[in-house]
Image (cartoon, coloured by chain):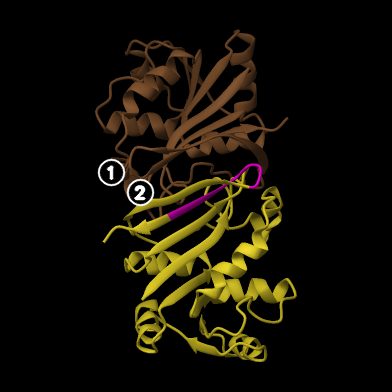
Chain colours: A brown, B yellow
Amino acid sequence: MQVIWYTAMSMDGRLAGPGGDLSFLQSIDAGHEDEFEEFLADIDAVIVGASTVRWLEREGHGSMPTEGKPVWILTHDEELAGRMAEGPDRVIRREGDVGPVLDEIEIAGHGRVWICGGGDVAGQILALDRVDEVVLTVAPTALGSGPAMFDYAGPASAVFSLEELSRYGTNAVRIRWVRKR
Amino acid sequence: MQVIWYTAMSMDGRLAGPGGDLSFLQSIDAGHEDEFEEFLADIDAVIVGASTVRWLEREGHGSMPTEGKPVWILTHDEELAGRMAEGPDRVIRREGDVGPVLDEIEIAGHGRVWICGGGDVAGQILALDRVDEVVLTVAPTALGSGPAMFDYAGPASAVFSLEELSRYGTNAVRIRWVRKR
């Protein structure tokens, strides 16, 4: 199973500004949507944390942007998962350590898993050394504060190979790193 | 005056791991030293925070790696600045807001200023929108925790132009961003 952290971040490694502000994404002027669709077409399952789901709710998104893929939501909040389950996605709520959840996704036969967010979930998976690929769109914006793209309370170091590097739109950068095994 | 933040960071925007650990820099296998010398040759003055100076002390560096350029140290700690002044550099200790310190450096006639560190000093200068250039060596390592390369307690957003992008060594990335004015 391959676990992929595909996300956009500021040049200083943040997923959002203060208060979850995503306006920095406007400094990325490439056709992000088509490419995301292509990425998603190869994904079999999604894992996401409560904070990302709450952010989607606040922004008025009724469901995950995942086109019917099964979604594992990491949360103690049954109501939150229940509301997400009203959308078109198959939602599986789990709580506690992320390791057994990844095991469950693998046993279910899924080959490619997208970490939809946030940096805390990605950080936990990094600490288990189960992040296989990082696909970053780096915005030409510095934020100075906000949640980090890998956010873990402890050492979680892992070295990757640089597989792709290109300019993305006018001033953004696309980087694809693959974990050295 | 041009203010340049030239530094190395992890793929997730961190200057060090827990406890100031810089071992992630070993995943950058390019000839960093020659290039740093070239960069430094065009620098007229240096600004640095107390935490970076303390780190240099702990690591056994008796002075700044700045070849006699004048160094403005931002610290309340007179003894720390005093010890640095025993080295070959001209050391000017200042405390309080970084804005008047930048003004002083400019009035002294310096054209190119290097922010030597850390992310807190860079973040304060970002918040004043006085960072003109960011030269990043991005290591192929994810750290998950540690100090951010721009670290400011509040909004400090600024958009840059992508001026250079290249592979650096086997798996690292070099990015040069210039502030859009």
Q: Where is mark 2, residue-wise?
A: A17
Q: Is residue B64 above or below residue A43?
A: below
- Secondary structure, mark 1, is helix
Report if the CB atoms under discs 2 and 1 are less than 8 Å apart.
yes
Q: Earlier in the sequence, mark 2 or mark 1?
A: 2
Q: Is residue A151 above or below residue A115?
A: below
- Span highlighted in magenta in the image: B169-176
Instruction: Give the spatial CA distance, label 2 vs label 1.
Output: 8 Å
Q: Which mark is residue B147?
A: none
Please state the chain letter of the residue tagged with numbered disc 1 in the rendered image: A
Q: Is residue A142 above or below residue A174?
A: below
Where does the C terminus of chain B fall, quadrant-wise? bottom left
| The one of B111 and A115 positioned closer to us in this rendering | B111
Q: Is residue B13 above or below residue B94?
A: above
Q: Residue at x 60, y 78 (%)?
A: B66
Q: Position of residue A38 (x, y in %)?
A: 41, 18
Q: Which mark is residue A23?
A: 1
- Specify whether A152 is left or right of A54: right
Q: Amino acid at mark 2?
A: Gly
